[in-house]
Amino acid sequence: MVLELLGTLSLRNETPPVPVSAQQKKSLGLLAVLALAGRQGLPRDRIEAYLWPESSASLAQHSLDQAVYAIRQALGSSFILSSGRELRLNPELVQVDTWEFEEAIRAHQWAAAVELYKGTLLDGFHFTDSREFESWIDSERSRLRREYQTAVEFLANAAAESGDHARSLTWWRGLVTSDPLSAGATKKLMLALFAAGDRAGAVKHARLYQELVRQELEIEPDPEIERLAASFTHPRIAEAAESSAVRKARQDQSISADESVEAPTNPSVTPSITRRTLEGKKSGRRERVALYAVIPIAILISGAAIWGWIRPSSSKPVLRYRLVVDSTEAIAKGSSWSGRIALSPDGSRLAYIGGPRSQLLIRSRDRLHAIAMPGTEGVTNPFFSPDGKHVGFLEDGGVRIAAIDGGPSIRLTHGGPSIIVTDTLTGLAGASWGADGMIYADNDGSNGLVRVEAKPGAVPNRFTTLDTANNEFDHTWPDVLPNGKGVLFTVTYSGEKGVKGRFSYAIAVAAIPSGKHRVILQGATYARYASSGHLLYVTDDKRLMAVPFDQNSMTVRGEPIALTEGIRTGLGGSADLGISATGTLVYSTGAETGTQELVWVTRDGKADAVDPEWSGEFLGFPALSPDGKRVAVTRSANGEPFEVSIKRLDRGPSVHLAGDGNENFQPSWAPDGRSVTFTSNPAKGPSYVVIERADGGAPGAPELHRTGNIFNAGWSPDGKWLIVTTDTLGAGDILGMRPGVDTAPIPLVATAFTETSPAISPNGRWLAYSSNESGRDEIYVSHFPDTRVGKWEVSTSGGTEPVWSHRGTELFYRDASGNLVATVVNANLDFSVGRSTILFPAAGYESLRYTPQYAVAPDDKRFLMIRPLETGTPDKLIVVENWFEEFKARSRESEPAPRR
């Protein structure tokens, strides 16, 4: 039995024919779902949610049972296998084309993979109205298409290296057919046509591409297409290039047969191609240079590099161009305080946060598409290891790293998507990997930097210390110097160093290993060291600057020069900026500075702005008043410090709470709705809890002080308990205090692990929280206030940010993939866990491991969430090759003229 998902969905068998009952739409849909899940299968509840999203739990379960029964009756009782709560296809009874396709890709059997790919995954087959399911299908569809294109690229290059230009053209045409709007594929086809002597065909295809882009996308096509076409129509240049290609073709005829490679037409020849590519790099490179002899000529004519990431030529022209990506791989709308891009040291890979699920994407310079790292939804701040073989990223207080294999496709090793280096202490404002094997990272809260060894389970240690005497408020955005002597980073000032109470920034350098630091540049942020001996940084007015810098003495040695303007910046001095040691610079531009807005999101994922006129550079920790008519939220605008604002919903006025002159955040309401409790974070000393009237009529009064920081202050429904969390080194604990009864907080959940996000049920009997005791964050519920009586695990696929429904019958949280999940619970005298349902993908909304970044409406039908504000001007990724040469030229221009 053969199940085909690539192209039109079909189930076929030669003898006997497939029964009609097994070819019904619902039966085929179930088989397709199980096939896409792979050989491991899927849990029943996930299948029910995919195929019967509108049905009740009991009805969906019944429908699935009926569908499985019908298939087993038609195809055999063992066609679908059951294992506990999971269902899977029996691989001994069915061949699945997607399975065979991916096996061919993994084995580098490119011709076999291309033959199996008969079209877009499940082309024309519509399942249900499940948004989460459609998102999964779209993701798989894009992934398989990218793998197919990778195979076609390999075959095209192999044919070209063997001198079979006709076969190479066939492959390039196939690639363009699969992605007709790709500028990269179009340019490669044009070059192949020109190398084969078909100048007119190359120019004709350029015109077809340009017309298609204008009609389908309603934008102007990539200008490099026009420049390349113009170079092909230039008589002298075209004649010279054509002669060069003909001479090389004659030379290729003298190459011995055992050194040549024919384009593969069946899987059996693929190993020889792979071996030839690996063992014959020198000859392959020589042939490739000859084949594309037109490339340097095209560059001289057009004045810009082919987008295909060809390495800089010996003349080292400065090349600047916009990196065009598919809409499914577009850079994510920026978080207000995180960097989104990183460039590997050799410039061969770009890591960035993007796609519809805000995942970590890695794009190789020789590929048309990026590869998404599974399980990285909602992560931030990618960074590379010094050797470029690993990529790291931050995730809500933790550092994770993954190995990158340098094969035809990018894959993850270490037995999974990534390994956790540490899940405590680190913040969100950047990390950098040093040659000493240490990762230097932002600390949680307003603190100095920390450093942690790049190995699983490593314990972070404090590296720098705030100079509070000079009003240093935070240390962020580290960048380790290549010689290992120091770390560049951004200093955030408040108070006297700030302007009218706002933050200001400076660049400092800290010595390794002492951590002692000194400021080297004022009015600057996001420093990055360049191997040319320069320090790049961003100014308050979004200019990218470069200044000579000696990494041995760690001192500035000259005057700065502006490289460009309009750099995209965010809160806390963040920017999108990546530099390679080979002279490549990548940055993003954008009209807005990470502005965010409040939105209402329904249970099926539909979002509407609360008030389009009310936004900020940062919004966080939304808390609805008991009557649901007001929201307390942390807000920052125009570079000012965090403050707590109270806004009447939806488009009513807002007031700012007076606070006590410090950074104020994480508000929560008193049960009577008359006052708001929040955390105050002074420049000196630990944070503490403040209570203030909700109308802002009087300054706040401190309620709770400790020797260490305290966060997440919230009240029990009866107003008798004040609950807080700590950030103890290596762990966090949940504490409780009865004002007027207890003289100090008492431990409620305090272990060697990290417990955070406490939430008390509406009836006051149960405490929900997140803990990493199992090795990753999951949601647990304990009795309250005596948490020792019992404990239940609610989530099984990762969980953070628990929030109770107002009726107390559901517990909402985010799973490890960033989805918002609703779990039915019985939370009366006894506690039990029911069915969990994924409501909608929430990776595109703000999230934070330690505190919920959403609130639930009184009717439990909507969620108040935070998202990046839509702008009329999308962010653009700009690539500059050989920017060192540009700096040299501008340095010469800035030198004083010689005296006469």
Image (cartoon, rainbow, N blue to C red):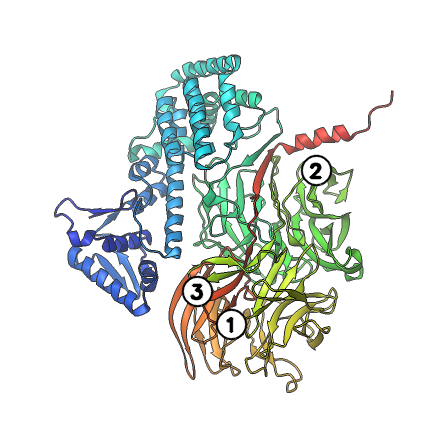
In the image, residue 723 lies at what x, y percent?
Answer: 59, 77
Label 2: state its secondary structure: loop
Question: Is label 1 or label 2 in front?
Answer: 1
Tell me the residue that label 3 is attached to: 821
User: Residue lying furthest front in this view?
Assistant: 652
**Residue 38 versus residue 202 in the image, above or below:** below
**Residue 824 versus residue 68 in the image, above or below:** below
Residue 726 seen in the figure? no
Tell me the residue that label 2 is attached to: 533
C-alpha span from label 2 to label 3: 50 Å
Circles 2 and 3: CB atoms closer than 8 Å: no
**Residue 680 versus residue 90 in the image, above or below:** below
C-alpha span from label 3 to label 1: 15 Å
**Residue 65 versus residue 220 in the image, above or below:** below
Amino acid carrying label 2: it is Gly
User: Residue lying furthest right in this view?
Assistant: 900
In the image, residue 561 lies at what x, y percent?
Answer: 74, 36
**Is residue 106 or residue 355 the one in the foreground?**
355
Question: Does residue 340 appear to the left or right of 132 in the view shown?
Answer: right
Circles 1 and 2: CB atoms closer than 8 Å: no
**Is residue 839 or residue 307 the one in the foreground?**
839
Tell me the residue that label 1 is attached to: 769
C-alpha span from label 1 to label 2: 49 Å
Please report the residue visible at 44 percent of the width from the left and 20 percent of the height from the top.
194
